[in-house]
Image (cartoon, helix red, strand yellow):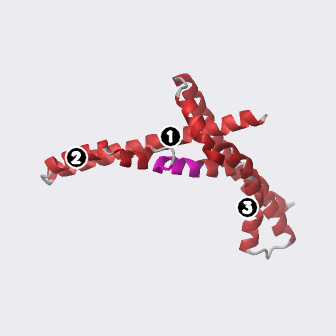
Amino acid sequence: MNRDKFEYFLNAVHYCLYLGEKTSNLKVNMWVTKIMCFLSKIFSFEDYYKTRKEKIEKDKDLNEFMYGKNAGFSIGWAHHWFGYFYSGYPIILSFILVGIALKYDSNVSGFTKLFIMAIPIGICYIPAYKAVFSGDKYLKYFKMFQKEDEQWHKKWKRITIAFCIGSVISTIIGIGAIWGVLLL
Protein backbone atom coordinates (compact mmCIF):
# COMPACT_ATOMS: atom_id res chain seq x y z
CA MET A 1 0.00 0.00 0.00
CA ASN A 2 1.50 3.33 -0.95
CA ARG A 3 1.77 6.26 1.41
CA ASP A 4 -1.14 8.27 -0.04
CA LYS A 5 -3.56 5.37 0.33
CA PHE A 6 -2.32 4.72 3.87
CA GLU A 7 -2.81 8.39 4.76
CA TYR A 8 -6.26 8.48 3.15
CA PHE A 9 -7.30 5.29 4.96
CA LEU A 10 -6.20 6.49 8.39
CA ASN A 11 -7.76 9.93 7.94
CA ALA A 12 -11.04 8.39 6.78
CA VAL A 13 -11.10 6.13 9.84
CA HIS A 14 -10.28 9.11 12.08
CA TYR A 15 -13.04 11.14 10.42
CA CYS A 16 -15.60 8.39 10.99
CA LEU A 17 -14.53 8.08 14.63
CA TYR A 18 -15.03 11.84 14.96
CA LEU A 19 -18.50 11.65 13.40
CA GLY A 20 -19.40 8.78 15.71
CA GLU A 21 -18.17 10.67 18.75
CA LYS A 22 -20.00 13.82 17.67
CA THR A 23 -23.23 11.86 17.13
CA SER A 24 -22.88 10.23 20.55
CA ASN A 25 -22.38 13.59 22.22
CA LEU A 26 -25.40 15.05 20.40
CA LYS A 27 -27.56 12.13 21.60
CA VAL A 28 -26.37 12.53 25.18
CA ASN A 29 -27.05 16.27 24.95
CA MET A 30 -30.55 15.56 23.62
CA TRP A 31 -31.33 13.20 26.52
CA VAL A 32 -29.95 15.61 29.11
CA THR A 33 -32.08 18.36 27.58
CA LYS A 34 -35.20 16.17 27.76
CA ILE A 35 -34.50 15.34 31.39
CA MET A 36 -33.90 18.99 32.23
CA CYS A 37 -37.16 19.98 30.49
CA PHE A 38 -39.02 17.39 32.52
CA LEU A 39 -37.41 18.52 35.78
CA SER A 40 -38.05 22.18 34.98
CA LYS A 41 -41.76 21.43 34.56
CA ILE A 42 -41.87 19.55 37.87
CA PHE A 43 -40.07 22.25 39.83
CA SER A 44 -41.76 25.18 38.07
CA PHE A 45 -38.78 26.92 36.56
CA GLU A 46 -39.72 26.13 32.98
CA ASP A 47 -39.50 29.72 31.72
CA TYR A 48 -35.99 30.17 33.10
CA TYR A 49 -34.84 26.88 31.58
CA LYS A 50 -36.31 27.63 28.13
CA THR A 51 -34.49 30.97 27.89
CA ARG A 52 -31.30 29.38 29.22
CA LYS A 53 -31.61 26.49 26.73
CA GLU A 54 -32.03 28.92 23.80
CA LYS A 55 -28.93 30.85 24.87
CA ILE A 56 -26.90 27.64 25.14
CA GLU A 57 -28.03 26.39 21.71
CA LYS A 58 -27.01 29.70 20.12
CA ASP A 59 -23.68 29.88 21.95
CA LYS A 60 -21.05 29.37 19.24
CA ASP A 61 -18.23 29.05 21.76
CA LEU A 62 -19.96 26.17 23.51
CA ASN A 63 -20.67 24.44 20.19
CA GLU A 64 -17.04 24.90 19.18
CA PHE A 65 -15.92 23.48 22.52
CA MET A 66 -18.14 20.43 22.17
CA TYR A 67 -17.98 19.70 18.44
CA GLY A 68 -15.10 21.77 17.07
CA LYS A 69 -12.65 20.05 14.75
CA ASN A 70 -9.56 21.86 16.02
CA ALA A 71 -9.79 21.44 19.77
CA GLY A 72 -13.30 20.34 20.66
CA PHE A 73 -14.44 17.67 23.07
CA SER A 74 -15.53 15.34 20.26
CA ILE A 75 -12.29 15.63 18.31
CA GLY A 76 -10.29 15.02 21.48
CA TRP A 77 -12.12 11.76 22.04
CA ALA A 78 -11.77 10.86 18.36
CA HIS A 79 -7.98 11.34 18.70
CA HIS A 80 -8.03 9.12 21.78
CA TRP A 81 -10.05 6.33 20.18
CA PHE A 82 -8.00 6.49 16.99
CA GLY A 83 -4.79 6.05 18.96
CA TYR A 84 -6.29 3.25 21.02
CA PHE A 85 -7.58 1.27 18.04
CA TYR A 86 -4.49 1.87 15.90
CA SER A 87 -2.28 0.66 18.75
CA GLY A 88 -4.24 -2.58 18.93
CA TYR A 89 -2.46 -3.89 15.84
CA PRO A 90 1.21 -3.61 16.92
CA ILE A 91 0.32 -4.78 20.41
CA ILE A 92 0.56 -8.38 19.18
CA LEU A 93 4.30 -7.90 18.74
CA SER A 94 4.48 -6.15 22.12
CA PHE A 95 2.82 -9.06 23.86
CA ILE A 96 5.09 -11.57 22.11
CA LEU A 97 8.15 -9.62 23.26
CA VAL A 98 6.83 -9.49 26.83
CA GLY A 99 6.19 -13.24 26.67
CA ILE A 100 9.78 -13.83 25.52
CA ALA A 101 11.12 -11.60 28.31
CA LEU A 102 9.03 -13.45 30.89
CA LYS A 103 10.12 -16.82 29.55
CA TYR A 104 13.79 -16.01 30.06
CA ASP A 105 13.37 -14.10 33.32
CA SER A 106 10.15 -14.45 35.28
CA ASN A 107 11.20 -11.63 37.63
CA VAL A 108 10.94 -8.88 35.00
CA SER A 109 9.82 -5.64 36.65
CA GLY A 110 6.56 -3.96 35.74
CA PHE A 111 8.43 -0.97 34.34
CA THR A 112 10.49 -3.21 32.06
CA LYS A 113 7.35 -4.97 30.81
CA LEU A 114 5.74 -1.61 30.09
CA PHE A 115 8.87 -0.41 28.30
CA ILE A 116 9.03 -3.58 26.18
CA MET A 117 5.36 -3.13 25.24
CA ALA A 118 5.77 0.55 24.44
CA ILE A 119 8.61 0.14 21.95
CA PRO A 120 6.70 -1.60 19.10
CA ILE A 121 3.59 0.48 19.71
CA GLY A 122 5.59 3.72 19.67
CA ILE A 123 7.55 2.79 16.57
CA CYS A 124 4.41 1.73 14.70
CA TYR A 125 2.49 4.84 15.80
CA ILE A 126 4.99 7.22 14.17
CA PRO A 127 3.66 6.69 10.60
CA ALA A 128 0.07 7.11 11.80
CA TYR A 129 0.95 10.31 13.62
CA LYS A 130 2.64 11.70 10.52
CA ALA A 131 -0.29 10.68 8.32
CA VAL A 132 -3.04 12.13 10.51
CA PHE A 133 -1.85 14.58 13.14
CA SER A 134 1.37 16.09 11.79
CA GLY A 135 0.52 19.61 10.71
CA ASP A 136 -3.16 18.86 11.40
CA LYS A 137 -3.49 16.96 8.12
CA TYR A 138 -6.78 15.54 9.32
CA LEU A 139 -8.42 18.97 8.95
CA LYS A 140 -7.61 18.99 5.22
CA TYR A 141 -9.07 15.52 4.88
CA PHE A 142 -12.14 16.43 6.97
CA LYS A 143 -12.99 19.18 4.48
CA MET A 144 -12.61 16.72 1.64
CA PHE A 145 -14.65 13.99 3.39
CA GLN A 146 -17.53 16.35 4.23
CA LYS A 147 -18.16 16.76 0.50
CA GLU A 148 -18.52 13.02 -0.03
CA ASP A 149 -21.94 11.48 -0.60
CA GLU A 150 -23.97 9.26 1.71
CA GLN A 151 -22.72 6.09 -0.01
CA TRP A 152 -19.11 7.01 0.79
CA HIS A 153 -20.00 7.70 4.43
CA LYS A 154 -21.76 4.34 4.80
CA LYS A 155 -18.82 2.50 3.24
CA TRP A 156 -16.26 4.15 5.50
CA LYS A 157 -18.41 3.74 8.57
CA ARG A 158 -18.38 -0.03 7.93
CA ILE A 159 -14.63 0.02 7.29
CA THR A 160 -14.09 1.94 10.53
CA ILE A 161 -16.16 -0.57 12.48
CA ALA A 162 -14.14 -3.41 10.93
CA PHE A 163 -10.91 -1.55 11.79
CA CYS A 164 -11.99 -1.22 15.43
CA ILE A 165 -13.13 -4.83 15.71
CA GLY A 166 -9.87 -5.97 14.11
CA SER A 167 -7.94 -3.99 16.70
CA VAL A 168 -9.80 -5.63 19.57
CA ILE A 169 -9.27 -9.06 18.02
CA SER A 170 -5.56 -8.28 17.58
CA THR A 171 -5.32 -7.36 21.24
CA ILE A 172 -6.98 -10.63 22.27
CA ILE A 173 -4.66 -12.58 19.97
CA GLY A 174 -1.72 -10.73 21.52
CA ILE A 175 -2.81 -11.76 25.00
CA GLY A 176 -3.04 -15.35 23.77
CA ALA A 177 0.43 -14.95 22.23
CA ILE A 178 1.93 -14.30 25.67
CA TRP A 179 0.56 -17.61 26.89
CA GLY A 180 1.69 -19.34 23.71
CA VAL A 181 5.26 -18.07 24.12
CA LEU A 182 5.34 -18.99 27.80
CA LEU A 183 4.04 -22.50 27.17
CA LEU A 184 6.46 -23.30 24.34
> What percent of the width, then of the height, locates residue 8?
67, 34
In the image, residue 139 above or below residue 106: above
Mark found first going from the N terminus, 2 or 1: 1
Q: Residues within 10 Å of mark 2 (few under 14, many from 20)?
A: some
Q: Residue furthest left?
A: 44
Which of the 4 image quarters holds residue 14?
top right
The image quarter in which residue 165 lies? top right
Closer to the N terminus: mark 3 or mark 1?
Answer: 1
- What residue sits right under mark 1 in the picture? 20
> Which residue, given by chain and number where applicable, does mark 3 sit on?
118
**Element under label 1?**
helix
The residue labelled by disc 2 is: 37
Using the image, tell me which numbered label, if any, was put on residue 6.
none
For residue 180, say whether it is visible: yes
Q: Nearer the viewer, residue 15 or 68?
A: 68
For badge 1, the amino acid type reads Gly
